[in-house]
Structures are given as structure tokens and as C-alpha cells.
Amino acid sequence: MWMYALRRLILTIPILLGVTVICFALVQLAPGDPVQSLVRPDATPEQIQSLRAFYGLDQPLVIQYLLWLWRVLGGNFGMSISTNLPVATEVLRAFQNTIVIALISVVIAFIVSMILGVIAATRPGSIVDRLVTAIAVFGISVPTFWLAVVLVIFFAVELGWLPATGMGGGSDTFNYLDWNDFKFAIMPIIALALPPLAIMTRTTRSSLSEILNQDFIQTLRAKGLSEFSIIVHAVRNIMPSAVAMLGLQLGYLIGGSVLVETVFTWPGTGFLLNKAILTRDLPLLQGTILVLATAFVLINLVVDLAQSLVDPRIKRS
Amino acid sequence: MTDVIETTTPTPASRDRGGPAQPMLIVENIKKYFPIRAGLLNRKVAEVKAVDDISFYVLKGETLGIVGESGCGKSTLARLLMYLIEKDEGHLVLDGDPVGEKAGVPLDGLRRSLQMVFQDSYSSLNPRLPIESSIAYGPKVQGASAKSAKEQARALLEKVGLKADRFGQRYPHELSGGQKQRVNIARALALDPRLLILDEAVSALDKSVEAQVLNLLGDLKEQLNLTYIFISHDLHVVKYISDRVLVMYLGQVVEIGPVDKIYEDPKHPYTQALLACRLSMDPDERVDAAPLAGDPPNPVNPPSGCRFHTRCPHAEDVCMSKMPALGDALRSDPSEHLAACHMVHAGSGHSKAPNPEVTTLPLWQGEMR
Amino acid sequence: MTDIPAGSLHIDKAQAAPASKVRGYWGSVWNRLRYDYVTLSCMALIAVIVLLAVFAPWIAPMDPDKSSMANRLRPIGYKKFLLGTDEQGRDMLSRLLWGGRNSLLMGIVPVIFATTIGGAFGVVAGYYGGKVNMVIMRTMDVFFAFPSVLLAVAIAGSLGGGIFNQMLTLTVVLIPPICRVAETATSQVRSLDFVDAARASGASTISILFSHVLINVLSPVLVYSSTLVSISIILAAGLSFLGLGVAPPTADWGLMLSTLRQSIYVQPLIAALPGVAILITSIAFNLVSDGLRQAMDVKA
């Protein structure tokens, strides 16, 4: 088993390297002189010159990449143009804000999708089943940023129950257990939760009905097991892949939260991305993307390893 | 069907290059090992010795049956002969010309002489093509015009017993197993080959259908002057159709000889056990113990010495240490009966081996080439 | 008959004439689709949306870019503004119609390009296997390390906005999943006997790919691509929402959603309209691709 884990870990390294190559290339992609993308608009020619030397911009691309990689591994992600703060600190702070709501969203989505999936799978073809399928289709077709706007319209503008945007007192003092703070997080969580909910409901429903149609379930029924126990059996059967899906969706949420966070001005990594785009702040953009992509890869790795632990069918040579 | 087939209808001079005495195909020292990769860096840790140094020849106009159980390497052998898999070692000689070497038959020429009929499975015919097109594909690839290829295909369908008008445009899923096999045969014949390799060609068919297809094969062989290599695990069928039989075990030839001699007097313990596994229809002849115990050992780590020694009732020390030789399969007469067993070769060290002075098996009987 | 002896003739009589008309693969697909009312109505809906978009220049009642400060944010049904006006006084209905052209373009064109490019890579990787496969698929794996939204934002964010960049971004984002599907399908087909039979007849690789492999790989790949259309539309709208799409004042559903955000306190319904358009289009494409998948999945 450890061989598998080690092997998987080692295979991840080239992928991470590839990720860094892409992130590095992003800055090169930007139109114009790379230096212009990396400095403030009001920089003096001397500052530009020293930055050019610092980044090694007059050296071949490979050397630049290696220099950049070396700095990144040391934790130096450069300086944000717009705020003049180290990118690393900003991203770290934002990351905490994103990961909390992403986690809450995914867990809620998981629980609800399990319930809906079980109901739909045990009553195939019924109205409930169709309703659940409709919800699922809706969930994957809806643009989340629009849903976010609709939520704001409904709960903030029309009903006035929840605040439209922001994080209340600020992320440093934010207490999730305090309603006054938490109410800012509710709508972002709902908006984030819907697509994973839809996907997981669909998957749960189809895997459950597949299992329930198998012969060994008939055997269990013949043995006199109650329907409830049979459902429990079936659910236990699909747990490994369901949990894997949970992990994957968490990864997607962390990486893809930019739109929802923009609507709610929730100061997470997504919002940071948006800010970076608006202000053409390439170091910030690059740093944020690097962190998010790395997080995604690592989450995938954890999910894979956890699955291999739990699912006996996965080969662990 | 026991003796060597004398010359049948001579093929046109342009195709028959070597004359009647020249074997259609000579297979020399063919080897194919598949690497197994494992570990951190996917290094090769072991090899599956799928085909391990096999040599034999096939005479013009005869049917050579190849029998063996699953995993003995017969399908790999078939694909090696067809050049669908790359061999590690060995050569082929087609009608006197070496294949693939500089002054020999190019791969293209091999294709025109040697074709294969696959086992009827869902994957032997392209599910998205009407069978006419599947058959016409070969001629088209070799340069025929679309029209003439289609005509050829339709003619071949008639030849295998399927009305071209009724079946030509059908799709494989609309045919029965026997019909699909006929199409497979027609497809193999489309390139006008001289030698057909039939890899488990009737194994998936019901018995009655199997009989019809076997009859068809026999008729075609006569009409078109074909040579067959018939691979199967079904001993009855092999006995019915073959002139000579080759028995394979774990990638090696363990016995070869005329069909009657093999079936009436099997020399290798494996062949004996295989034949004993055929159940009799007579209820008085019941079998209590299975003649062949256990599963075939792993081709990755074959037993030392004689590969069969772990299941052989006559195994002795020499069997564990020394690999028995088959004999010179390439230079022996087709009527000879060779077996790779220490009990058969004089002076091998086995207690049951014949005395060196009293040899019943003539080992050398003139040149074949 | 030819000189086949009586034993074989026996079967010929037993072979029944085909009970129904010989039908090809597409025929049986259509046969299944015929009764799938949901899919059929969604296909009709898509046709309507496409027609509306194509003929927008003629159908739209007003000039979508004509702003009027006096008529800002008028409600639905106000005078001749059937769906009200936006924050710059432009007619919503016209803008929605024109915006549809952009969105549909962004949904379909990148998918077509990505299918061609990704499909080609996938087929090559699946057919040749070995090192070729490794190089191609490992490169795709690196792209898979990014969630689609992130990758789209990353590329578009660096390249800058504009229609061309947006299309390029979406194409790049969609290539890896299509490549993966194509590779899986191709390597499955590759191992089937009829491919070996084709090789045994001496055909060149190109001939085998086109005559035997592609027709079997095409349907799973196309079905998968059709599911990507709605994703592409939503991604494009998302990019426009962030300002990475077309430049204002061009009508674009995602961009409209963004600019109307400040107006949600005044005219919430109007602010939500562009999203409704996206939702309807997306649902229609999703249901159609679902229906197609079901119709094409079963072996005829």
C-alpha cells in the first residue's frame, strides 16, 4: 500500500512542475513587455531596470523560469502591484476565507445529495424521482454567478433578511459561530453548493439504482432484511466513490469560486483573482492561480489515496 | 487424412514457387516474451514467456491442427505468424522465400498469401460497417476499385453460402453466429490467400452450426487449394479436421505428429491427460478422478526443466533439471511422431526411457528441404 | 448455387428474410429518439434560439447599442420596450437577441475546434499507444490539474479580453477532456479483432483510422462534445461577467449581467433577465445532449 502511495506521490511531481510551467507562461502570454506587467504604472526607469535584473528578464526563458521557481519554492511570490504587499500573505489570508465556505458548501451539498439520491433511487420513475432529476439538471445548467445575483435580489433586496455583500467586520475577526458574522456567509454558501449538489445527486442516484438492481440485493431481500437495512447496505457500498466525489467537488469549488465571490465581494481567493484581473496585477494573478492549482492537485491526490485505502478493488501493486 | 498429402491440384505456376515438396510455411525458433513492468519506475521485473522457441512446418494442402489450453500461447503464435505482433526472435519461410529479410518476401507479399479467420466474437467485424464493406475492405486496400472490390465481396458471400442480395447490406448484429463466421471466412478469402490461420474459428458456435462451418471450410479448402493452420482447444474438432497435430503447453511444442498417431498413441503425458479429459458418451465409462490435476502454472515463472513436471504423474529428478527436447521438428518427416518428454528419448536418464540400442522412433529420416 | 454440397444448402433455407427493414446505426438512433419527447422539444427550442440569434438583426425591434439617458431602467412592458431597458436606456429585448449571437457563438465554435483538435490528439494517442500516448496524455494531465473556471480565468486574464482571446481560451480549456474521451474510445476500439483483421489486410494506418476506427469513435466523442456546449456557454458568460469577454457596449449576456448588477435595487427583474436567457439555453443543450447520449449509447 505504501508503494502505491509513494508511487502516486512521485507521479504528482511532474504534474506540479507542469502547473508551475503554465503559471510561469501566463505572464509571458500577457501582451506587451513582461516588465510592464510586473511593475507599478508609476515606476521610475531605475526601478524598472532593477526589477528587470531581479527577474532576469534579459536572460533566456529557461533561466527565468528556474529563478522564478526557486523563489516560489522559497515562499516568495513577488509583490502585488495594486497593494504593494507580498502576494504570499494576501493569498494566504484569502485562501482561508475561501476554504471555509467551500468546505461548508460541499458538506451541505453532500448530505442533501445523499438524501435526494436515496429518495430518487428507491422510487424510480415517480414524481419525486423526476423532481430530483429536474433539480439536478437545473443545478448543472445554471450559471452560478446569476444564481448568486438572484439570491441577492431575493434575500437582500426584496426581503432584506441577509446582507448583500461583504464579510461584515472583516476576515480577521470573523466568527462563523456568530450569527452577525455568519449571515454574510449564507448566500455564498448556497450559491456555491448548488452545482456540486446537482452533480452529486445525479451520481448518487445512478450508482444507487445500479447497486439496487444487482443480484446480491435480491439475496439480502430474500434473507428478510428490511428495506431500510438494504438501503443502508447499498449506501455503504457507494460511500467510497461518493466521498471521492466530495473531495473532487471541494477542489472544484476552491478553484472555481471566482464568480460567486465576485458577486458577494467575499474576500477569498476568487475575489483576489477578480481584483488581479481588473487591475492587471499579474504577480497577484500568477500567485493566486499557482496556489489554487496546487491545492486542487493535492486534494486530488488525497482523494486518490483515500479511495485506494477504502476501496479494495483498486489495485495497489 | 493420415499420410502426407500428395500434391493436389497444382496452383498456377506464378503462385507456387517452391514446388510440391516445399512446405508452405516454415516457422523457425519463434520467440515472444512480454515484459511485465512494476515498481516505482515501471521497470521490467519479469517476462511472460508466451511463445518460447517454437519451430515447425506446414505442408502445402494440409491442415495442421494446434491444440492447447488457455494460456499456452496459441493465439499469440497465430498473431506472430500474421505479423500482427512483433516477434522477438525467429524467422518465417514462406514457400521457400524468407519473410521480411532483405532478399525475401516483403510484408505485403505475406499479407497476400497468409490470412486469418478470427474467432466469432462481437469484435471480429466492424459493427458500423455492412458486411459487404467489411469484406471489400481488403481488396480495396490492395488497390482494387470500389466497384470491383464490392463485386468480389458479393461473390465471396455467395461462395460461403450467404446470398449477397439478402445479406450484403446487413450489419454484424443482424447476423447469427454461424453467419458471422461465414463472413469472417469470406473476409479472409478476399485477399486470395494460400494459407489460412483459423484461430478458434468455430469455438463460439453451437455444435450444429459448427458442423456446417467445418463442412464449408473443408469444401473451400478443396476448391481453392488452401492450406490450413487450425488452432483450437476442442480436441474433437481438431481430430476431425487435421492431418497433423501440434500440441502446445506453456509456450512450447510438446508433441507433434500425424493426427491418428497422436490420438491413438499419445506420447507426451500432457497429451495423454488432455485426451483422457474427453468425456465419453457411454455411461459405463465414467471417470472418477480428473486426469489432469491443478491449474497450468504461471507462464511468468515456468517450472524448471520440463514445464509439465509439476503435473506429470511420471515426473522424476531428471524432469526437474533438464528440459526435454522435441527433436528436430524442421528436419523430420511429416509422418513422424515427436514428443518432448524424457520418457521417449533414449538415454535421457528417465527410468522409463527406452534403451539406447533399441530405438523405436527413427529420429532422422532424410532431408525435407 | 455454386458447388457447395447439400449440407451447407440446408442452412440457406433456414435463414429467414429480415423481419424489418435493414437499418444502419443512425437509423436505429433516430428510431429511439423519435419517442423521446423531452429531447425532441429541447431540440426544437434550440432551433428557435438559433433562429432568433441568426435573424436578430432583422427581428430586434431597436438598435441594441442605442442608449437613452432619459429611458434608463424602465420596467418590462414600458411603451415599446417589451422587456424594459437597461442602465443605459437600451432596449433589453434587442440586446438579449443580439447577445444570443455572441453566446451561441461562444458555445459552439470553441466546442467544434476543441473536438477537432482534442479528438485528433486523442485518436493518435489511443491508436499508437506507448510513448506517443504517454507524452500526449501527461501533457493533458497537467491541464487537468486546473479546474475549468480557473484555467479559463487564468488564460483569459493573461491574454486580455476580446472575442478572439475568449474563443481561444475556451478552446484550450475544452481540449483536454475531449482528448481524454477520444483516447479512451480509441484504445478500446484498437484492441478489437476487426482492427487486427484490417491490419492483416495490409492497410496503412491512415486507412484503418479513417475507415474503421473513426466511425466507431465518433459517436462517443460527439456525444461528449455536445455536453460541453452548455458548459462553454456558461464559461463564456462567466468570462464576460468578469470583463474578459467582448468589450462594452456590445451586447453579451454575461456582460449584461455584470453591468446590471448595480441596478438590482431598482429593477431586479431586468437585472435577472440575461441570466434567464443563459439558463434556458443551457438547460436546452443539456437535455438534448442527455437524450442523444441515451439514444446513441445502446448497441443497435
Image (cartoon, rainbow, N blue to C red):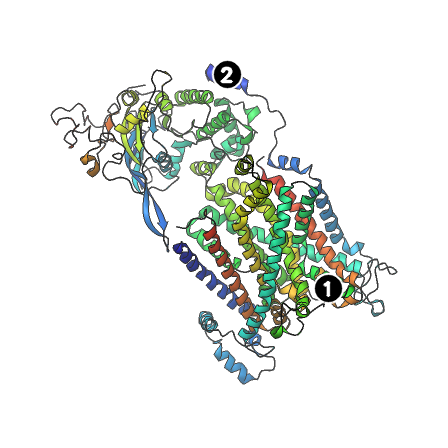
Q: Nearer the viewer, mark 1 or mark 2?
A: 1
Q: Is residue B165 above or below residue A234?
A: above
* Label 2 Cα neighbours within 10 Å, binned few <14 / some 14-19 / many ≥20: few
Q: CA distance from mark 1 to mark 2?
A: 78 Å
**Secondary structure of the residue carrying numbered label 1:** helix
Q: Which numbered disc covers residue C10?
A: 2
Percent across and percent down for residue A224 are 56, 36
Percent across and percent down for residue A97 are 60, 68
Is there CB contact under 8 Å for labels 1 and 2?
no
Q: Is residue A77 left or right of residue C274?
A: left
Q: Amino acid at mark 2?
A: His
Q: Residue at x 67, y 47 (%)?
A: A132
Q: Is residue C254 above or below residue C289?
A: below
Quadrant location, the C terminus of chain C:
top right
Residue A31 seen in render: no
* Label 1 Cα neighbours within 10 Å, binned few <14 / some 14-19 / many ≥20: many
Q: Which residue, given by chain and number where applicable, does mark 1 sit on?
A: A152
Q: Is residue A38 left or right of residue B12?
A: right
Q: Is residue B198 above or below residue A292?
A: above
Residue B356 occupies quadrant: top left
